[in-house]
Each structure stands twice: as structure tokens, then as C-alpha cells.
Amino acid sequence: MLDTMTITKAVGGVCGALLIYLLGSWVGDTLFSMGGGHGGEQVASYVIETDDGDAGGAEEEPMDFATLMASADASKGERVFGKCRACHKIDGSNATGPHLDGVVGRAIDAVDGFAYSGALEQVGETWTPENLFHFLESPRNAAPGTIMSFAGLNKPEDRVNLIAYLESLGG
């Protein structure tokens, strides 16, 4: 069963595999080393120069709210409203959140039968288009402590389109 020849072949196989592994490691180190040995100076083979000045990376100045609202599209806002539909209705009935028909121009915290957290009073007295624009960007930042868990709409175009859609619903 286990004779000397079988043991010799097994030990030889293990030693051969170890030798191939060490040889491959040595070749890899030689091919991909940066040179210099221990503690030697290492120099990059090429350098990518970048401009740290302000001229090239200047951020675009945001458009003012009136210009954005003038270009708003209510039909696109209806698609954006899909993100709101999980918590809000536009048929006059409340869901997880208050109904949003007639919200533009409505007093904040004014829907009967809905229990507000009180945090929305920080936004203002009425839901003007400007108040909605800033609130929809990040509800948690606009009204800290609000129970609304929506993360917000990053794109200003989405916000004004949604406001135009909500305005078109009337009240």
C-alpha cells in the first residue's frame, strides 16, 4: 500500500509545487518591482500633471428660481410625482402623508385630519413655490425633525417640474 516509492513521489510533488510557486513569485517580483531595493528612492515612470487652480474646475452658477419655474414642464412633473405617490394622494384623501392637491399656496400644517409633527413650521407659513422648491431638495434639512422619510430631489429641474404639476392640480 504505502511503499517507499509512493512516499517519495508525494514528497517530490510537494517540493516541486513549492519550487514552482517560489520561482513564479521571484519572476513576478522582478518584473513588477519599482527598483531601488530596500529604502531606495523610487521614481514614477510617468507623471500625470493636474491643474490645482480655480480656473478649470469652476462650478456653474445655479440658475435663479424664476428662470427655472419659467421652464417647468407639468407633464414631466407628473412622472416625478411617481416618487411621491407611495405616501401622498392627489384625490383629497390622506395616506401616509397628507394629500397634495391644492398644496401650492396652502397653509403649512393645514390639512384637516392629518397629524403633523410640527417640524414643518420651520419652512414658513404657506407652501409657496419657493418653499416647496427648498423643501423638496432635502426635507430633513429644510425641516429638521420632520417625520417625512423622503430623501429629496437633487435635480432642480425635477423639483420645478413637480411644483408645476402640483400647481396644475389646483385645489
Image (cartoon, rainbow, N blue to C red):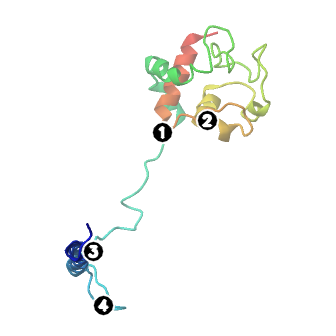
In the picture provided, is 165 more to the left or to the right than 34? right
Find out whether the residues at labels 1 and 4 contact each other: C-beta distance under 8 Å. Answer: no
Find out whether the residues at labels 3 and 1 contact each other: C-beta distance under 8 Å. Answer: no
| Residue at x 52% of width, y 21% of height | 81
Q: Which disc, if any, is residue 134?
A: 2
In the picture provided, is 137 more to the left or to the right than 111? left
Q: Indicate the amino acid at tag 3.
A: Val
State the residue in front, 66 or 49: 49
In the picture provided, is 93 more to the left or to the right than 71? right
In primary-sequence order, the first of circles 2 and 4 is: 4
State the residue in front, 160 or 68: 160
Q: Is residue 74 above or below residue 4?
A: above
Residue 21: % across, % down: 25, 74
Q: Which residue is mark 3?
A: 47
Find out whether the residues at labels 2 and 4 contact each other: C-beta distance under 8 Å. Answer: no
Secondary structure of residue under mark 4: loop
Q: Indicate the amino acid at tag 2.
A: His
Q: Which disc, if any, is residue 63?
A: 1
In primary-sequence order, the first of circles 2 and 3 is: 3
